[in-house]
Image (spheres, rainbow, N blue to C red):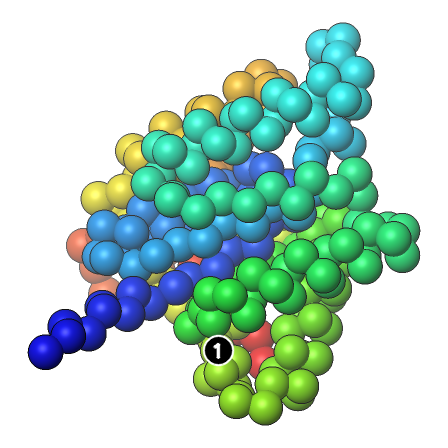
Amino acid sequence: MTKSLEVIEAILVISPHPDDLEIAMGGTVAKEIAQGKKVISIVLTDGRRSQRSFVCSDEEIAKIRQQEVREAAQVLGISKLYNLELEDLHTSENQEKLNKQLSKLIKQYKPKEIYLPHPELDRHPTHQLAARLVFKLIEELINNNKDNDLATVKIWAYEVWGLFANWDLEVDISDFAEKKLAAINCHKSQIKDLAYSEGVLGLNRWRAVFSNPHSISKTTYKEVFIKLK
């Protein structure tokens, strides 16, 4: 009798830039992986538009950022990392490439959950655009999916450049905060000028301490998410 293969639940995280996953939900990703979930990380752009105080061409910073995100993925335990390496998301040509590559990956993995930036609350224009493009693609895939594999997919927005006043999901990442910090620190080209780790871990600490005004929190770090409909 043939033994049935174990179906591992897939979670897909979409990042406009190479460090968005680590900043927004590095703790949640590490926790999900520890619990046996399969996390697929998809980075849309190559990061060549990144601000920097040091002398470096766009091509050079793109290569640096691609190496950094690979190192961060190893720290978190991500086994599947896809760099679409788009220069930007503004041209119709690049948007067509995004749709083609991303739709293929979504159909391949049939994720139960998809994470991406919030299309309105995130203040970064590229994050907003990426979220709108991806959300539109997911809607088209659901409407055109005869087998209805994606009908029950949950779509979550994570916070990066815009803080949430309310949220639908909070994840205790207390046991994974150090791993998240290590992953963020892999992005040396970015933390050189901006104290991402201090800002993000400070936010996660605040989320835990002030999560409920009517009770004493026993957790030390939390990440929060909004469910998109």
Report the residue at 35% width, 32% height from top: 75
- Front residue of this view, candidates 7 and 198: 7
The quarter of the picture where residue 82 lies is top right
Report the residue at 70% width, 79% height from top: 140
Position of the C terminus, as image quadrant, is bottom right
- Front residue of this view, candidates 149 and 162: 149
User: In the picture shown, does residue 179 fall above or below 169?
Assistant: above
**SS for callout 1:** loop
Report the residue at 22% width, 57% height from top: 35
Q: Residue furthest top?
A: 55
Q: Amino acid at mark 1?
A: Val
Q: Residue furthest left?
A: 1
Report the residue at 79% width, 38% height from top: 87
Q: Position of residue 163 (x, y in %)?
A: 57, 54
What residue would you read off at disc 1?
153
Q: Is residue 102 visible?
A: yes
- Front residue of this view, candidates 163 and 25: 25
Total numbered labels placed on residues in the image: 1
Q: With 75 as the anchor, is 22 left or right in this view?
A: right
Q: Position of residue 48 (x, y in %)?
A: 75, 29
- Front residue of this view, candidates 59 and 49: 59
Q: With 118 as the anchor, is 213 left or right in this view?
A: left
Q: Position of residue 164 (x, y in %)?
A: 55, 60
Q: Is residue 119 visible?
A: no
Position of the N terminus, as image quadrant, is bottom left
Bin the neighbour count of mark 1 within 10 Å (Cα to Cα): few under 14, some 14-19, many 20 and up: some
Q: Position of residue 207 (x, y in %)?
A: 39, 53
Q: With 51 as the anchor, is 183 left or right in this view?
A: left
